[in-house]
Image: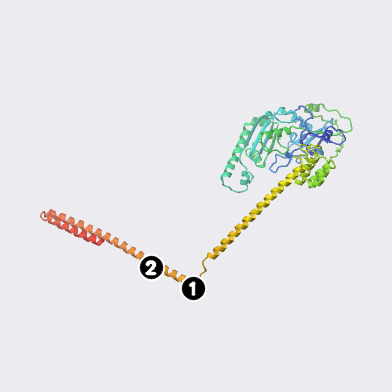
């Protein structure tokens, strides 16, 4: 059995396969020909009529990753030989007797702890097939979003798509934990030593706890599904990895051999994204290669049981020679097309000449992109549009070459007129602005001159001295007036206090006199009337004196 690893093939165009591509797919020449075909694991129809595009933008790297996501090809301990065709070392490729190399994601076959020198690929295949009735679990978490789904592999279609009905269980959660505009998780900011106290930060901290509670509740309620799952694929950020694989109370065991990383870039954690991920993991890569010029050996009976997986594995006879035969597979290095190079460097004249005069193919792809998509600037893109206007029927411009519309002479004239009109309006507006600014400055100058004329003359030294003398005299007079008023107020207050004291003394004396008269009345009734009259008269006299003093 021959196992090889390989980088990804060129990205397929989004349009239908061209005649040249169809020739490559069906060719069995000495050079290796590769084409990706969706073939699910569970042994469905192996029809090769439906071709899907290779390695979209989700294969790019992501900075917000932890140890349980991304490519694991570089970390694997297998001693594989590189050859063009599958997954940048992220796939294991088995070449069968029919000359077809089928690639499987390495994370599906091996865990991080597997020693690939001890565990053969056919054993890994058998292990996966024995557990094909058990569900696969996909866990995605990033940026406050969480999605987890458990899938029944038998319900995945033959084209490799995972319908929503194939999910046994699924759960999603979303919380506001990322700082608006500034970016970054609040827990990461808190870990940096900053103690931010605001309404937004408090809300994000509460949402971090709520998100962890949602994730923990999901794994707790899914305990039976997680325990029965054959594989668990995880793609989470570093912050969420610390939550899921917490040493004190982990939701998943980091050392569990079933826990595997997702070997490619994933999108936003949603239920649809988990369906896409599991569908891609359950998809095989089909590659057509040249069969060696020697008789096909017999296939062991124990390997024949793998036939329901659509794999045809060539087994070597017992007794491998001491020196293994070297595998000499030439790598196919595809040079950059000249049209792509001209578009990338911004040579608009060369682009137009190649398409119109030399019949260069604008629908040809290189590294998954057509020449129009790698154009350096607008002038280069306009060259493609002019060529489209010149040769409208020569190529599939819109779908194949990704050129949006033709740039005819009439359209260029309209654009030039529109730009001229815009430029004229801009100049008129600028002229009006300068005129307004000039008038405003003129008015400001006139106002300043008028103020200078109407301003009072500056005082001389003698005038300043006289003014100071007058001010001192006025201040002295005002100060004397204030002192006199204060003295008058003090004198009036003393007079009022004295009057109150005299009145109180008079009242006391009056009460004593009345008391004496009352005592004398008891002893001399005859003198009581006279005493009363005298007392009344005395009271009247004293009252009149007191009033005079008050006045």
> Residue 78 location in percent, x, y?
78, 38
| Residue 480's disc number | 2
Say if residue 536 shows up in the picture.
yes
- The residue at which mark 1 appears reads as 462
Q: Is residue 13 left or right of residue 172?
A: right
| Residue 300's disc number | none
In which quadrant will I find the N terminus?
top right
Q: Residue at x 14, y 56 (%)?
A: 533
SS state under label 2: helix
Between marks 2 and 1 in the image, the one whose residue lies nearer the viewer:
1
Q: Residue furthest left?
A: 526
- Answer yes or no: do the residues labelled 2 and 1 have beta carbons within 8 Å? no
Please name whichever residue, 174 or 481, is drawn nearer the observer in this view of the structure: 481
> Residue 396 location in percent, x, y?
79, 36
Total numbered badges shown on the rendered structure: 2
Q: CA distance from mark 2 to mark 1?
A: 27 Å
- Establish if 352 lies above or below 106: below
Q: Is residue 464 left or right of residue 508?
A: right
């Amino acid at each position: 059995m021959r196992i090889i690893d390989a980088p990804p093939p060129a990205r397929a165009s989004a349009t239908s396969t061209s005649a040249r591509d169809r020739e490559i797919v069906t060719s069995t020449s000495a050079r290796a020909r590769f084409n990706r075909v969706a073939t699910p694991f569970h042994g469905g129809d192996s029809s090769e009529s439906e071709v899907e595009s290779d390695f979209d933008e989700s294969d790019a790297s992501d900075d917000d990753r932890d140890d349980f996501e991304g490519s694991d090809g570089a970390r694997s301990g297998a001693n594989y030989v590189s050859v063009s065709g599958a997954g940048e070392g992220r796939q294991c490729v088995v070449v069968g007797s029919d000359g077809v190399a089928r690639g499987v994601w390495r994370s599906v076959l091996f865990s991080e702890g597997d020693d690939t020198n001890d565990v053969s690929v056919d054993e890994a295949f058998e292990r996966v097939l024995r557990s094909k009735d058990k569900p696969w679990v996909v866990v995605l978490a990033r940026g406050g979003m969480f999605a987890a789904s458990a899938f029944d592999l038998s319900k995945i279609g033959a084209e490799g798509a995972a319908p929503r009905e194939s999910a046994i269980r699924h759960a999603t959660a979303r919380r506001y934990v990322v700082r608006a505009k500034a970016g970054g998780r609040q827990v990461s900011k808190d870990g940096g030593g900053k103690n931010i106290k605001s309404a937004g930060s408090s809300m994000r901290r509460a949402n971090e706890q709520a998100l962890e509670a949602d994730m923990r509740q999901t794994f707790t309620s899914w305990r039976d599904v997680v325990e029965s799952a054959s594989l668990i694929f995880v793609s989470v950020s570093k912050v969420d990895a610390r939550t899921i694989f917490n040493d004190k109370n982990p939701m998943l065991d980091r050392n569990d051999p079933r826990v595997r990383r997702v070997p490619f870039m994933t999108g936003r954690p949603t239920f649809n994204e988990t369906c896409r991920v599991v569908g891609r993991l359950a998809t095989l890569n089909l590659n057509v290669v040249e069969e060696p010029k020697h008789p096909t050996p017999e296939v062991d009976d124990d390997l024949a049981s793998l036939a329901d997986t659509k794999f045809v594995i060539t087994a070597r006879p017992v007794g491998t020679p001491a020196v293994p035969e070297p595998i000499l597979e030439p790598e196919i290095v595809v040079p950059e097309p000249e049209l792509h190079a001209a578009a990338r460097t911004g040579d608009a004249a060369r682009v137009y000449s190649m398409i119109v005069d030399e019949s260069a193919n604008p629908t040809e792809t290189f590294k998954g992109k057509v020449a129009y998509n790698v154009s350096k600037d607008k002038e280069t893109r306009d060259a493609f549009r002019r060529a489209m206007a010149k040769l409208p029927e020569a190529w599939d411009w819109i779908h194949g070459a990704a050129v949006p519309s033709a740039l005819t002479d009439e359209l260029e004239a309209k654009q030039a007129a529109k730009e001229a009109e815009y430029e004229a309006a801009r100049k008129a507006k600028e002229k009006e602005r300068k005129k307004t600014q000039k008038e405003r400055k003129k008015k400001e100058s006139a106002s300043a001159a008028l103020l200078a004329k109407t301003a009072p003359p500056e005082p001389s030294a003698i005038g300043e001295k006289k003014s100071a003398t007058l001010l001192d005299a006025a201040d002295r007079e005002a100060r004397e007036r204030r002192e006199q008023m204060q003295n008058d107020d003090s004198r009036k207050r003393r007079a009022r206090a004295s009057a109150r004291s005299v009145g109180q003394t008079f009242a006391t004396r009056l009460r004593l006199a009345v008391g004496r008269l009352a005592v004398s009345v008891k002893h001399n009734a005859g003198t009581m009337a006279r005493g009363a009259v005298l007392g009344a008269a005395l009271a009247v006299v004293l009252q009149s004196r007191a009033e005079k003093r008050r006045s």
